Amino acid sequence: MSFRLHKGETFSLVGESGCGKTTAASLILLLNEPTSGEVRFENMSLTGLSVAERKAYTRQVQAVFQDPYGALNPRMRVGSIIGEPMEVHGYSRTERQQRILEAIKAVELLDGSEKKFPHEFSGGQRQRIGIARALTMDPTLIVLDEPVSNLDVSIRSQILNLLKDLQDERGISYLLISHDMASVEYMSHHIGVMYLGRLVEVGESEDVTHRPLHPYTATLVAAATPPGRTPAWQLPIIGEVPSPLNMPTGCAFHTRCPYAMDICREVRPVLTEVDGQRQVACHLYPDHVDSIDKDLTESK
Ligand code: SF4
């Protein structure tokens, strides 16, 4: 997979559980090594980094994880949790103290929060602590792995708005990993839709969420469309994701796609530019798209 994440923008990877989006994030965060191929970031291969290069990279690429309860050590005070990455990177005690207080202010936690323990905070506040920890390193990229999916719906928009404000102020790029199309549409400049380990559609957020081209994207969009709004394609999600250990031949989505043709079972479609701004991996384009029925609701 290959995608372009512009400075100060958000690129989201979406797809069902098991599609590989978290694996992609863990490779970018150097938590796993690729079994084949390589990860490149700003024209630099992340394979075989020297100790100094690895340190410089992990300074500018930070992460905020899904579980605000499990991600914070309950025995450490919040100040120590926020300051941990700086300690690893050898910042002086004075600089750590200053940056911890600045980060607490930036995520709108109360003064004195650094002296408390994680259990004294709500889920939303704990996620703010996780964001503060990432901010202390002045990162150019933050990987947001399902940052609001464990939070109450009422809190989600507060955290997303905070992330947006921080991006506007600091020019941080985000790689957002999510299965929640509503959060993705709100946050993203560009979206990549993944299915069984591959990108099947990449485009601007507005295009992908309002005018999906790939049938799999269309099912995700239709499933997330709120009552009263009609999705571009009336396409229900059918069946289960096949096991990645037993990948379907040809297009991996052909076992669930109502438009599957003979070629789909034999030839894997590659990601191809369709309208200048968009890439899609589907044999419907450009030859068959005019003849397909986009309304496959059960009532028909
Ligand atoms: Fe469906 Fe064929 Fe397109 Fe795959 S390539 S999404 S099976 S139409």
Image (cartoon, rainbow, N blue to C red):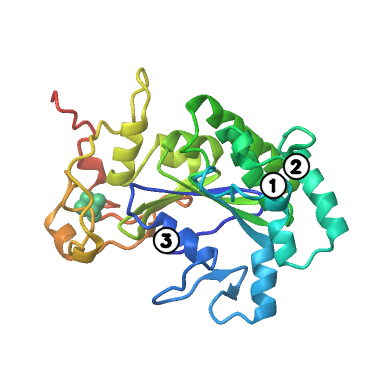
Sequence-wise first label, 3 or 1: 3
One can see residue 232 in this view: no
Instruction: Tell me whether the residue at label 3 lies in contact with that at label 1, contact meaning CB atoms closer than 8 angstroms.
Output: no
Seen from the viewer's position, the closer of residues 246 and 228 is 246
Sequence-wise first label, 3 or 2: 3
Residue ID for mark 2: 115
Residue 23 tag number: 3
x and y, in percent, of residue 158 in the image = 60, 30
The residue depicted at 74 percent of the width and 63 percent of the height is 87
Marks 2 and 1, how far apart at CA: 6 Å
Q: Residues within 10 Å of mark 3 (few under 14, many from 20)?
A: some
Which of the 4 image quarters holds residue 291? top left
The residue depicted at 31 percent of the width and 33 percent of the height is 223
Marks 3 and 1, how far apart at CA: 30 Å
Residue ID for mark 1: 77
Which of the 4 image quarters holds residue 103? top right
Indicate which label's residue lies in the foreground, 3 or 1: 1
Direction from residue 155 to residue 265 in the image, left or right: left
Instruction: Tell me whether the residue at label 2 lies in contact with that at label 1, contact meaning CB atoms closer than 8 angstroms.
Output: yes
x and y, in percent, of residue 247 in the image = 21, 63
Sequence-wise first label, 2 or 1: 1
The residue depicted at 45 percent of the width and 61 percent of the height is 24
